[in-house]
Amino acid sequence: MINVLQALGGKRIDMTFISDNCGALSSFKLSPIPRRYCITAFGVLCFFYIGTYVILRGNSLTTMKLFNQNVCLTPNCDDNIIKFNQTHFVNKTTKKVLMWTKFFLGGWTDDIAMFMNKSKYSCVVTTDRNELESADALMFHYLDLYVWETVPGYRRPDQVWIMYNAEAPPHLHYTGLPWLNAFNWTMTYRTDSTVHGPYGAFVPLTPEEKIKASEMYRGIDYTIGKTKMVVAVISDCPDDAQRYRHMRELQKYVDIDFFGKCGNLTCPRTNNPVCNSMVYKFRIAFENANCKDYVTEKFWHSFSRNTVPIVNWKGDQVISAPPKSYINIHDFNSAQELSDYLNLLNANDTLYNEYFSWRLNYKVFGINMWYHFENLCAALHTPREAQTIIDPDKWIRTDSCNKWSITGVLQRKWDRFLFDWGW
Ligand SMILES: *[C@@H]1O[C@H](CO)[C@@H](O)[C@H](O)[C@H]1NC(C)=O
Ligand SMILES: *[C@@H]1O[C@H](CO)[C@@H](O)[C@H](O)[C@H]1NC(C)=O
Ligand SMILES: *[C@@H]1O[C@H](CO)[C@@H](O)[C@H](O)[C@H]1NC(C)=O
Ligand SMILES: *[C@@H]1O[C@H](CO)[C@@H](O)[C@H](O)[C@H]1NC(C)=O
Ligand SMILES: *[C@@H]1O[C@H](CO)[C@@H](O)[C@H](O)[C@H]1NC(C)=O
Ligand SMILES: *[C@@H]1O[C@H](CO)[C@@H](O)[C@H](O)[C@H]1NC(C)=O
C-alpha cells in the first residue's frame, strides 16, 4: 500500500491508518494526496486481494501457501555470522550478566536470576549500567532496541553481547537502528540460535524416572471427567497464520467452545477456570504465525491441563516431539478428515489414551518461559569460538515466514475484513 501511494507522489501515511480497518477510509488523513488517487490505489489493492481470494477460497487450509516464501536462499544460513578462530574465553567462577534493556515495559531480571540460579554454574544478574566494564555478558531484548537506545560505550573481546527474542518475525516490528556487528550470540526459540531458548521442551526421562512415571501414569484413563470435546482461546484475531479461517472450517464439523476476543464465548478472568478447565479432550493451540520452530506457551500449557493440543504447524515450524503427543491440522487433507479423526478418538477411549503414553518416556519442561536461562549460564561457562552476528534483522528474516511490514499488517487486517464479510 505504501509503495503504491509513494509512486503516486504521496508524502507520509498517517500511522492511524495502519492500526485501522482497511474499510475505514474516513480515518485516512492524507492531505498532500488528492483523494481520488487514494481511492484509485485503494481500488487496485482491493481488486488484487479480491482476485486472490476468489481463486483461493474453498481451499482455505492452504491459503497461506501463496504468501509463504523461503527467505533463506543460500544452502548455509550461517553466512550472516562471522566466526573468529579463537575463543577469548575467560574462566571465572561467577559470570555477571548485565541486562542492558528492559523486557517490554517490565523487568526480567528477577526471573532470569531465579532460573540462572538453577544452573550448576554460578551467574549473577544486574541492571546497573555502571557495571558495564565488569560484565561478562550483555542482554538486549530485540523488540526494545528503539532508535533512542544507547549503544554501550565499552567492549572487551571476551564480553558476550546477546540478542534475545521470543516473538515471530511477522510480529517483530521495526524498532530503529540495525545494530550491525553488535551481537555475538542469539538467544531465541529457534534451534539455530547460539543459545536455544524455547518456550518449552520434551525431556527424555532417566531410567529411574521411567520407573516412577510407569507407577504414576500406567493405566490412567484420561477420558474420565472429560465431558466436552474441543476448547479454543484466541484473542489476537487478524494473525499471520489465519487461525480464524481454520477455526471456521473446523467449527463446521466439530463442537468447539471458542473463548477469547476472537470467539463467541468470554472468559470473565484471564485465569478463568472455565476456559482452563480440564473437561475438554482437545485444546486448540494454534500459533499466530508459521515460523521456524515457533511454538509458544499455548502448546506447552496444554499438557498441564491433561489435554491433547491441536496445532497448526507448517514445515520447519514442526519441533521434535514424541509420537502421539499432539495433532497437527496440516497432517490432514481437509477439516472434515480431521474432524473424523477427532470423533474417532472421542469414541474410542483406547485410541484417545494413546495420546498420553509419551508420559512414560518424557516430561515437559517450561511452564515458565524463562527456564532456559539456566542454559545461558552454562553457555557462559563453556569455551566457544568467538563470533559476531553481522545483521540481526537478516538473521531473523532467515525464516520460512513473512517478516513484519506495513503491507503485511494491512494484508492481515484486510484478510480479516474479508473474512468477516463471509469470504
Ligand atoms: C585456526 O584454526 C585452525 C584449525 O583449528 C588451526 O589449525 C589454526 O592454527 C588456527 N589459526 C590461528 C591463527 O589460530
Ligand atoms: C575453569 O577453572 C576451574 C578451576 O580451575 C576448572 O575446574 C574448570 O575446568 C575450568 N573451566 C574451563 C572451561 O576451562
Ligand atoms: C540463589 O540460590 C541461593 C542458594 O541456593 C539463594 O541464597 C539465593 O537467594 C538464590 N537467588 C535467587 C535470585 O533466587
Ligand atoms: C458460538 O458459535 C458456535 C458456532 O458458530 C455456535 O454453535 C454456538 O451456539 C455459539 N455460542 C454462543 C454462546 O453464541
Ligand atoms: C478402539 O481401537 C482399538 C485399537 O484400534 C481397537 O482394538 C478397539 O476394538 C476399539 N474399540 C472400540 C470400542 O471400537
Ligand atoms: C564479540 O563480537 C566482537 C565484535 O565483532 C568481537 O570483537 C569479539 O571478539 C566477540 N566476542 C566473542 C566472545 O564472541
Image (tube, rainbow, N blue to C red):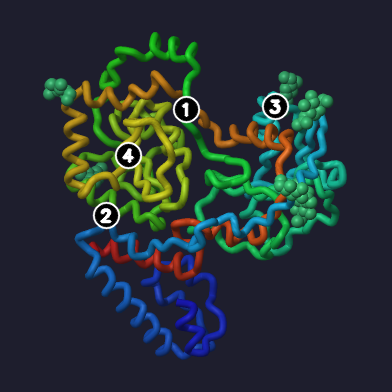
Give residue 61's mark: 2
Earlier in the chain: of badge 1 and badge 2, it is: 2
Earlier in the chain: of badge 3 and badge 1, it is: 3
- Residue 413 is left or right of residue 33, and the answer is left
Q: CA distance from mark 3 to mark 1?
A: 20 Å
Earlier in the chain: of badge 1 and badge 4, it is: 4
Q: Residues within 10 Å of mark 4 (few under 14, many from 20)?
A: many
* Image quarter hosting the C terminus: bottom left
List x then y, in percent, for residue 224.
Answer: 27, 18
Q: Secondary structure at mark 2?
A: helix
Q: Compare residues 81 and 186 and report the one nearer the observer.
A: 81
The amino acid pointed to by label 4 is Ile
Give residue 364's mark: 1
Residue depicted at x 64% and y 61% = 391
401 over 33 or under it: above or below: above
The amino acid pointed to by label 2 is Leu
Q: CA distance from mark 3 to mark 2?
A: 44 Å
Earlier in the chain: of badge 3 and badge 2, it is: 2
Q: Which residue is mark 3?
A: 117
260 over 203 or under it: above or below: below
Q: CA distance from mark 4 to mark 2?
A: 14 Å
The amino acid pointed to by label 3 is Asn
Q: Secondary structure at mark 1?
A: strand
Circle count: 4
Q: Residues within 10 Å of mark 1 (few under 14, many from 20)?
A: some
Earlier in the chain: of badge 3 and badge 4, it is: 3
Q: CA distance from mark 1 to mark 4?
A: 17 Å
Residue depicted at x 32% and y 77% = 48
The amino acid pointed to by label 1 is Val
Q: Are marks 3 and 2 in contact (CB under 8 Å)?
A: no
Give residue 310's mark: 4
- Residue 150 is left or right of residue 370, and the answer is right
